[in-house]
Every structure is written in C-alpha cells, then in structure tokens.
C-alpha cells in the first residue's frame, strides 16, 4: 500500500465524518423549519455569525456523540512501526487502513485521538459550567434581591475567590498533592448540594399551595438528587450508576469553584437591575413570596444574558481544560485530551507538525464556535 495523497486524506476524513454531516443536515433543517416556535434559538438563524458558531459547536457535539463510529482506531492503540509516521501512512498488516493524520510519538493514531478527545471536553466543560451556574444563580438571586447584609457577605466571599489569580488557583486545586488534604472532597460536598437546593426552592416556590404536586416533585428531586450526590461527591452510590474518577472529580470541582463567583456576580447584577421593574413590583403587590419572584419572575427575564454567558463560559472552561492537559494535569496521562496531545506533539513540532496541529485546530475551532454562538445570541437577545 502507498501513502495517501493530500486529496485522498481529506476525502477519507470527510467520509469518516458522515454521521456528523447527516446529523448537521437534520438538525439545521428542523431548526429552520420550526424556528418561529423556538424562541431565542430560532432567532439565532437570523444572525450569520450565530449560524457559523452554531454549526461549529454542533459539529463537535455530534463528533463526540459518534466518536466510536468516526475514529478509525482506538485512541490508545499502539501499532508497531507507526511511530511519528506522516499523515496518510498505511498501517502494516491492515489492508486499506491508514493513519489519516499520522502517528504520534507512541505510534497512536492522531486522527482517532483528536476525535475521541472531543468527548472528554464536551462532557466536562458543559457539565461543570451547569453546576457553576447552579451555585451562582442560587446565591446571586438573594444577594441581588435582598441586598443588605446578605449581599455584603456573599459578595465578600465571591471577591475573595476572584482576588486570587484564576490560573494559579486552578493549578493549586488540581495538583495531585491537594487530594491528600481532603479539600476537593469538602468542596464537592458543598458545591454538589446546590443543584438539589435550587430545584427544591424552584418547586416549593411554585407549588407551595398545591401539596399534591409539591410532594411529588420534591420527592423525585430529593431521591434522584441525593442518589447522584452520594455517587458523584463521595463515590458511595450502592448501585454504581453515579461515579466520578477521583482525578476527574478534582478537575470538575475546581472548574465549578473557579467559575461560580463570576456567575454569582453576573446574576447579582442582573437581579438588582430587574428587581426595579414594574412587573416585579406588581408581583410584590400581589403578595408573592420572595423566592417565587426571584425564580419565576426575575430569572426567566434574565435568560438572555445568562445563556450568552453560559456559551462563553464553556469556551473559557474548554481553554482551561486544554491548559491543564498541556501541563500534564488533565484527566489521565493516557487520555486523548486535546491539551495533553498538543503538549506531546509540541516537543517534535519542528520535525513533525502533524502531531500538535490537529488537536490545536480542534480546540481553537470549538472555542471560536462557542464565542460566535454567544455573539449571535447576544445580538438577537438585544432585539427583544
């Protein structure tokens, strides 16, 4: 077998991404067809920047979903004779098989590692950002609504965390030595409670006068919430459904802890502003409870800025995860983490640029897509 030409490599890569192209066509076609019913998401299709960002983000989301079908080899497979081979190099003993983007310094397929690496990024970054928003919203709403001592205390705590350089704080929290202190376990025990608290307050404020629905929703929330909480925070799920590797937990908690104060300040500022609106005063006049006003009057009207910040924050988190992997503090040394793959490739960049460039371009395109998507959402939300 001969080495593939550049056009053959591109053609084969496009073929491998067939599930992604099909998924993109279906999602975009349905979205455009029903865009008038899809609120802010539907309006996104009136923004060229937003569409480009959406396509880039959907591309990597679908890549993560169909990674097993797209990748030509296992991300950890080492094939004899394929160390540092150039893109399109044929695999000895496997007719018709090639390392489409070459082999790395451990004879692993770079293409497959880039594809599989999307999974770790698109699982950790959005999930950790959601948890950070739960913390920020749960604390930011009362701080902005009540003001006074509540606001002073919570803002002081947030400012203490923000006063420390983010990168240094992040590195401090994810170092293996910090695990022996028990700090990540304590942080996970506190931070992972906030989603439960948020949904309990959400349902109680809405259905406090309808016990039949209230008890049902609270029961489901508490059972599922504490079941997940015991498994994720303390690895104590008796059924083994919810589990998080200690190293992953360390990184996850660090992301939530670092992002929560910024989300808190955004929510606090928005709440202080919206709290002066007429419809909030009308709800107070009707005798609605504070948490009902915060969660069902103020929060829905803050969704535009929060959705925009959510997209941007996933991008920031993606960069942080890539930075950690680059410095060897990623999920695991063997993982296909993009940052770790870039770090491994940079050592031979002058001789073999194909090792570091694909994961670097992948990371850049995902973050670019998230930023463009956020710009499009911001542009359309300002028209409301």
Image (spheres, helix red, strand yellow):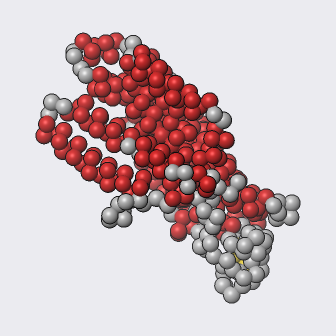
Task: Count numbered badges in the picture.
Answer: 0
Residue at position x 44%, y 21% from top? 151
Residue at position x 63%, y 38% from top? 166
Residue at position x 28%, y 26% from top? 292
On the image, the x and y values in percent for residue 133 come to 46, 37
Q: Quadrant of residue 354?
A: bottom right
Vertical comparison of 212 with 66: above or below: above
Q: Is residue 370 visible?
A: no
On the image, the x and y values in percent for residue 318 come to 60, 47
On the image, the x and y values in percent for residue 345 come to 76, 61
Q: Quadrant of residue 94?
A: bottom right
Q: Nearer the viewer, residue 61 or 266?
A: 266
Q: Quadrant of residue 295?
A: top left
Residue at position x 53%, y 69% from top? 69
Vertical comparison of 162 with 118: above or below: above
Q: Split into 4 quadrants, where in the image is the C terminus?
A: top left
In the displayed image of the protein, which residue is found farthest to the bottom? 93
């Amino acid at each position: 077998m001969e080495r593939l030409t550049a056009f053959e490599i591109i053609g084969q890569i496009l073929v491998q991404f067939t599930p992604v192209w099909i998924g993109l066509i279906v999602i975009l076609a349905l979205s455009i067809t029903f865009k008038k019913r899809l609120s802010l998401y539907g309006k996104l299709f009136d923004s060229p920047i937003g569409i480009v960002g959406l396509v880039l983000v959907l591309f990597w989301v679908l890549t993560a979903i169909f990674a097993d079908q797209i990748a030509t080899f296992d991300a950890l497979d080492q094939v004899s004779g394929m160390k540092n081979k150039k893109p399109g190099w044929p695999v000895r003993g496997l007719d018709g098989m090639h390392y489409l983007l070459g082999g790395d310094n451990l004879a692993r397929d770079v293409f497959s590692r880039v594809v599989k690496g999307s999974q770790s990024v698109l699982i950790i970054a959005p999930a950790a950002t959601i948890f950070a928003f739960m913390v920020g919203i749960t604390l930011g709403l009362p701080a902005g609504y009540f003001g006074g001592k509540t606001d002073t205390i919570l803002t002081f705590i947030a400012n203490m965390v923000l006063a420390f350089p983010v990168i240094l704080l992040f590195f401090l929290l994810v170092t293996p030595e910090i695990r022996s202190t028990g700090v990540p376990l304590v942080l996970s025990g506190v931070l992972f409670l906030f989603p439960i608290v948020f949904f309990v307050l959400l349902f109680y404020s809405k259905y406090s006068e309808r016990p039949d629905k209230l008890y049902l929703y609270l029961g489901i929330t508490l059972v599922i919430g504490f079941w997940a909480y015991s498994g994720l925070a303390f690895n104590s799920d008796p059924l083994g459904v919810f589990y998080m590797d200690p190293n992953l937990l360390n990184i996850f908690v660090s992301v939530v802890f670092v992002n929560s104060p910024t989300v808190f300040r955004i929510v606090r500022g928005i709440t202080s502003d919206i709290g002066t609106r007429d419809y909030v005063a009308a709800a107070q006049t009707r005798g609605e409870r504070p948490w009902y006003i915060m969660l069902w009057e103020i929060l829905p009207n803050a969704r535009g800025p929060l959705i925009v910040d959510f997209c941007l924050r996933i991008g920031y988190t993606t960069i942080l995860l890539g930075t950690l992997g680059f410095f060897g503090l990623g999920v695991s040394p063997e993982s296909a983490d993009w940052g770790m793959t870039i770090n491994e490739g940079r050592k031979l960049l002058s001789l073999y640029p194909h090792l570091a460039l694909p994961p670097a371009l992948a990371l850049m395109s995902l973050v670019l897509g998230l930023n463009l998507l956020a710009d499009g959402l911001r542009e359309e939300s300002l028209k409301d």
